[in-house]
Amino acid sequence: MPALFFRLRALPLCFLLAIQGQISLAEDPSLAFDFGRTAECRDVTSEVAANLYPGEKIVELKLRVSVHLLAGNLAKVEEIHIEVGDYDLGMRVHSFEPSTQLESNFSEAIHWTKTVETGKAIGASLGGEVPVLLGDVVAHITPTVNGKLAHREVVTETQKRVAPKQVVVVSGTLGQEHGVFFKWRSSPLTSLEGVHELTVRFVVPEEWRGDSLRVCCQATGQEKFLWIKQPATWANICAPLTVYLAGDEQARTAAKRYAQQSISGS
């Protein structure tokens, strides 16, 4: 009997866990990342940079990464994380965009006004007649006014406050400045779904014609199991990106061939 009772008591809990799992799976987002496997880099070396980096040049990479919500609730995605790195240590990060950005839900500064009003009251009594239980005797009440004349003082204080801001884009270097990361965070004014454009400029040898980078994309958030929230990864992909010097047709052909071999081998 005790074993049978235990099994009967356990059935509702198992049922709740199954329902919770189905609801969680129905709401969990499914995302896809997309970006090209080859990209050109333009030579953007200025006269100042040429003097600063003798024997080297600066090339600029522009990369588009698309985030596509396939199913589920996009609101559960809290952050999109993208990394671009050269793990052969042949390309050094010079600069990148977008940089760290803050935004506010308010279009202008907040104006705050406080008004304080002070004054004095007047003591007064009204006139009239009040019968007294002594025959025909009537008590008379004379109107009186006590205190000083009332006056009021109004003080208004106005302040202009900076609207609070939150971080929507975070970026920085990694791998001893041979890579860069970007984090896009959800906010009421922006959408994590769509195209995210990033620019990275590298310092490379003067004879540089091409190289291979690695791009990693990740979508993270939190999932709820019963009453507990825990970190969750909704999508994750890492793939090579072959880059070549713009205008170098031979390097472009070699980059495409290398990219096709990488896709076939994966």
Image (cartoon, rainbow, N blue to C red):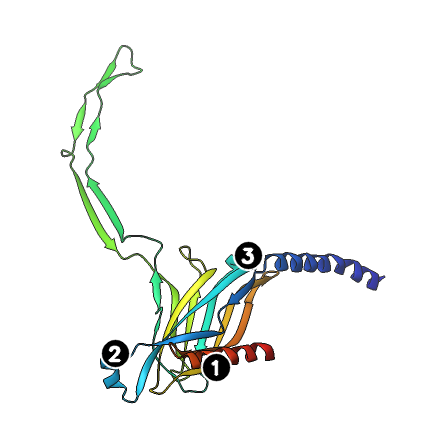
Dot 1 or dot 2: first in sequence order is 2
Dot 3 or dot 2: first in sequence order is 2
**What's the distance in space between the residues labelled 1 and 2, CA to CA?**
27 Å
Q: From this viewpoint, which residue is outermost toward the top?
A: 136
| Label 3: how many Cα within 10 Å (few below 14, some 14–19, many 20+) | few
Q: Is residue 209 visible?
A: yes
| Label 2: how many Cα within 10 Å (few below 14, some 14–19, many 20+) | few
| Label 1: how many Cα within 10 Å (few below 14, some 14–19, many 20+) | some
**What's the distance in space between the residues labelled 3 and 2, CA to CA?**
46 Å
Q: In the rendering, which numbered label is found on residue 118?
A: none
Residue 186 picture quarter: bottom left
Q: Secondary structure at mark 2?
A: loop
Residue at image coords 23%, 80% = 47
Q: Is residue 266 visible?
A: no
The spot of residue 224 in percent (x, y) is 58, 62
Identify the residue under disc 3.
73
Residue at image coords 19%, 32% = 122
Identify the residue under disc 1.
254
Q: Secondary structure at mark 3?
A: loop
Residue at image coords 16%, 34% = 150
Q: From this viewpoint, which residue is outermost toward the front?
A: 249
Identify the residue under disc 2.
46
- Amino acid type assigned to the residue bearing label 3 in the image: Asn
Do residues under tags 3 and 1 come within 8 Å of each other at their CB atoms?
Answer: no
Quadrant where the image shows the N terminus = bottom right
**Direction from residue 126 to residue 43 in the image, left or right:** right
The spot of residue 82 in percent (x, y) is 46, 71
- Amino acid type assigned to the residue bearing label 1 in the image: Ala
